[in-house]
């Protein structure tokens, strides 16, 4: 066993990389090991369902940093293509599929992985999209053309549908709910963004569940609970994700919807979690416990966890959640949290508006479709600016959502 104590970061992606960078920036001069299950350098995931799938050219992996930058520049020992399988908290040891690794500080950044349809095995024609490997496989399938069925009309499903439609495939999106994204956005806003599918030639089927997926010689058939059968050359399952925490079972860490952390992202003494796998009480929302699956929070939390792991003073991590999604040349952005009390500023029919979500006289969230004014709303939510003042500033300010 490698007993040299140091910072061990499990999960070599966005949050893990930011943890490593922050630890070095903060003056940590001990050993750092970055352990990652994928056999490639850390890379960015959002382009997988956007630029990578939209392009007709073969995908090219562009890591965040080169191996030399990580190894020589930051002094990181890379352990890629190696998976953590267990954690011995009392002994400060992570067990991997090859060995045991001791640590003095640990950052858990193992992200999330796609949910599967019960009883449906993945194959070269039935895919999910999470990793570079998945994106290359899906890119190849889209190059064949034909019919694509995407099960799940959430943000990633919608991006896949958008890319495939652009590349000339006949696309059907299958959504179990009566309308996609209603719990996240509310009826009016969800309907407005759902209209983008039909407007761009994608068939959206709602209120129907998949009962079985049958692979034939040339096609895959998706059987729906309303009796319809959809034939397709390719099927993508995009029905959400779950935190990658099975390897921590029995470790003594509290695991619920993610690894439970305190406000400083600490899950146990000298153990921190960050990114999609972490849940924590967010001080920006009065300590409401959140687990986010957004790029920005994974980057911020990774940085914060790396910093707290190598310092003595645990600082609470506070953020206003933010994510974006690109469909059919439209940019959707979401900030903060949903509330069913909302006002729309702008023009829904022209696909340019902001929905402002309020609780009492406080702005708690905002969703923008093709709106340039979003980032200043993040500050308004942080500063707890009065709702009326924010709305009025949108009506008259620069970049007004008219
Ligand atoms: C296709 C796609 C498009 C997206 N688009 C957007 C977007 O437009 N906007 C947005 O805000 N967010 C987007 N996201 C979400 C965003 O990319 C994630 O929130 C972010 O990647 C989370 O970073 P992370 O480091 O926490 O986890 P991940 O990026 O999931 O990385 C976790 C890493 O840990 C590794 N790992 C897991 N288990 C183990 C183990 N036991 N041992 C070792 N390694 C392990 C995994 O292999 C993986 O490399 C998108 C995600 C995907 C998949």
Image (cartoon, rainbow, N blue to C red):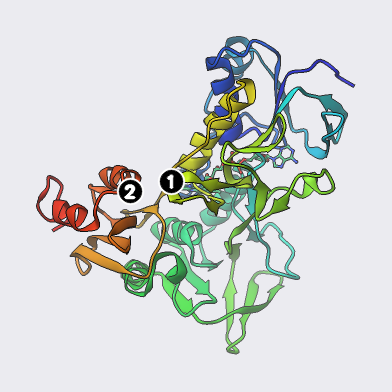
| Residue 204 pos. (x, y %) | 44, 74
Q: Nearer the viewer, residue 102 or 360?
A: 360
The residue under the point 51% across, 45% down is: 48
Residue 284, label in figure: 1
Tell whether 181 sits left or right of 305: left
Q: Residues within 10 Å of mark 2 (few under 14, many from 20)?
A: many
Q: Is residue 239 left or right of residue 395?
A: right
State the residue lying farthest toward the left.
396
- Depicted 387 relative to depicted 384: above or below: below
Quadrant position of the N terminus in the picture = top right
Quarter occupied by residue 328: bottom left
**Considering the image in quadrants, where does the C terminus appear?**
bottom left
Residue 354, compared with residue 180, is above or below; it is above
Position of 362 compared to 283: left or right?
left
User: In the depicted view, which residue is nearer to us: 200 or 310?
Assistant: 310
Spot occupied by residue 159 in the image (x, y as percentages of width and height): 45, 56
């Amino acid at each position: 066993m490698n007993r040299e104590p140091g910072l061990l970061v499990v999960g070599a992606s966005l949050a893990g990389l930011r943890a490593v960078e922050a630890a070095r920036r903060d003056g940590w001069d001990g050993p750092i090991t970055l352990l990652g299950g994928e056999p490639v350098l850390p890379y960015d995931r959002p382009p997988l369902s956007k630029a990578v799938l939209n392009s007709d050219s073969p995908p090219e992996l562009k890591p965040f940093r080169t191996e030399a930058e990580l190894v020589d520049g930051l002094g990181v020992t890379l352990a890629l293509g190696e998976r953590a399988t267990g954690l011995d908290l009392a002994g400060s040891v992570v067990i991997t599929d090859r060995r045991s690794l001791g640590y003095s500080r640990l950052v858990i950044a193992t992200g999330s992985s796609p949910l599967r349809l019960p009883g449906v095995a993945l194959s070269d024609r039935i895919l999910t999209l999470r990793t570079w490997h998945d994106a290359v496989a899906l890119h190849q399938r889209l190059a064949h053309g034909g019919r694509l069925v995407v099960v799940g009309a959430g943000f990633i499903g919608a991006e896949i549908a958008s890319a495939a439609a652009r590349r000339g495939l006949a696309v059907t999106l299958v959504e179990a709910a009566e309308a996609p994204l209603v719990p996240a956005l509310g009826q009016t806003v969800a309907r407005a963004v759902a209209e983008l599918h039909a407007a761009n030639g994608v068939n959206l089927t709602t209120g129907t569940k998949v009962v079985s997926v049958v692979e034939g010689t040339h096609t895959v058939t998706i059987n729906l609970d309303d009796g319809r059968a959809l034939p397709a050359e390719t099927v993508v399952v995009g029905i959400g994700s779950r935190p990658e925490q099975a390897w921590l079972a029995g470790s003594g860490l509290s695991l619920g919807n993610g690894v439970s952390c305190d406000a400083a992202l600490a899950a146990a003494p000298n153990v921190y979690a960050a990114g999609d796998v972490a849940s924590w009480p967010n001080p920006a929302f009065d300590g409401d416990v959140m687990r986010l699956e957004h790029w920005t929070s994974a980057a911020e939390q990774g940085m914060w966890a790396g910093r707290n792991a190598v310092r003595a003073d645990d600082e609470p991590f506070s953020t206003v959640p933010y994510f974006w999604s690109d469909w059919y040349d439209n940019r959707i952005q979401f900030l903060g949290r949903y509330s069913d009390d909302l006002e729309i500023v702008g023009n829904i029919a022209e696909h340019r508006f902001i929905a402002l979500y309020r609780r009492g006289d406080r702005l708690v969230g905002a969703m923008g479709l093709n709106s340039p004014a979003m980032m200043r709303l993040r500050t308004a939510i942080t500063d707890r600016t009065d709702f009326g003042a924010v709305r009025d500033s949108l009506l008259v300010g620069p970049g007004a959502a008219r």
